[in-house]
Amino acid sequence: TLAISPDGKTLVVGGGADKGGEIIVWDTATGKERRRWEFASAVASLALSPDGKTIATGATDPTKGAAITLWAAATGREVRRLNLPPRTRGTPHRGPVMLAFSSDGKTLASPDADTLRRWDAASGEEFRPIETQVRSLGVAFLDGDKVLMSWGGTHTVHLWAADTGKPLRHFAGHEGQLHDVAFSPDGKVVATAGGSDSGVRFWDAASGKEVG
């Protein structure tokens, strides 16, 4: 898994296998490796904060369980560990499947089966979880971080109020499970791909209506 900084100058790659994981930071202009470090668990997901100073990784440690770790991008120092509660139903944790920072870098979000979890990136405090009742594999912030978008377990994209968790609207048009979701830089248009039709659809984020 990988992430690139907003200014395009830094590429972060995370990976690994059963024996452990590693993070590699590259300079995109020169192609040179800046630094790398290893740790106990393979990286399942990765995100880079908007200011490029913090790397978040999701993984499952054989002894400590599933967690999100925040690292200082400049040094590789572990800043904070956010432990995820054990699952009481469904499949065991294999680590967070996706991570997303808000545009101001203050909030970190991750889907956890039928729950969306959010943390204060500075303190590590977890906000009230959003119980979605649908399995999600992806998450992103929209509309100036006011809206949280989730997708993956069904053919539908859901939008939630990021502060209260109130359901706002959803996009449903594909015949099967979604493969990927993207959105325009201004957050006004959402693109979905997947389903048995293997097509791409475009949606107005404000109204939930299909636009293309």
Image (cartoon, grey):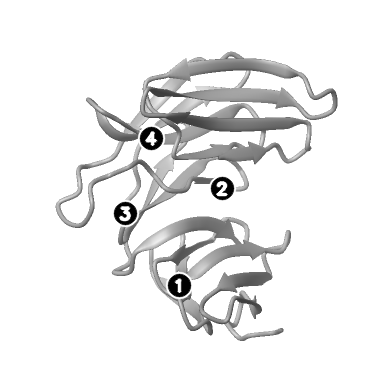
Q: Which label is found at residue 67?
A: none
Whole-Å distance between the Cαs marked 1 and 4? 24 Å
Q: Nearer the viewer, mark 3 or mark 1?
A: 1
- Mark 2 is surrounded, within 10 Å at the Cα level, by few (under 14), some (14 to 19) or many (20 or more) other residues, namely many
Residue type at tag 1 = Gln
Which residue does the numbered mark 4 point to in the structure image?
Answer: 59
Residue closer to the observer: 92 or 98: 92
Residue type at tag 3 = Pro
Residue type at tag 2 = Ser
Which residue does the numbered mark 2 point to in the structure image?
Answer: 102
Q: Secondary structure at mark 2?
A: loop
Residue 157 position within the rendered picture, expressed as x and y whole percent measured from the top left: 49, 72
Whole-Å distance between the Cαs marked 3 and 2? 16 Å
Q: Earlier in the sequence, mark 3 or mark 2?
A: 2
Residue at point 84%, 23% (across, down): 30
Q: Earlier in the sequence, mark 1 or mark 2?
A: 2
Whole-Å distance between the Cαs marked 3 and 1? 24 Å
Residue 25 position within the rendered picture, expressed as x and y whole percent measured from the top left: 65, 24
* In contact (CB < 8 Å): disc 1 and disc 4: no
Which residue does the numbered mark 1 point to in the structure image?
Answer: 177
Query: Quarter holding the N terminus?
Result: top right
Residue closer to the observer: 198 or 44: 198
Q: Quadrant of residue 28?
A: top right
Whole-Å distance between the Cαs marked 3 and 4? 20 Å
Residue at point 44%, 39% (across, down): 44
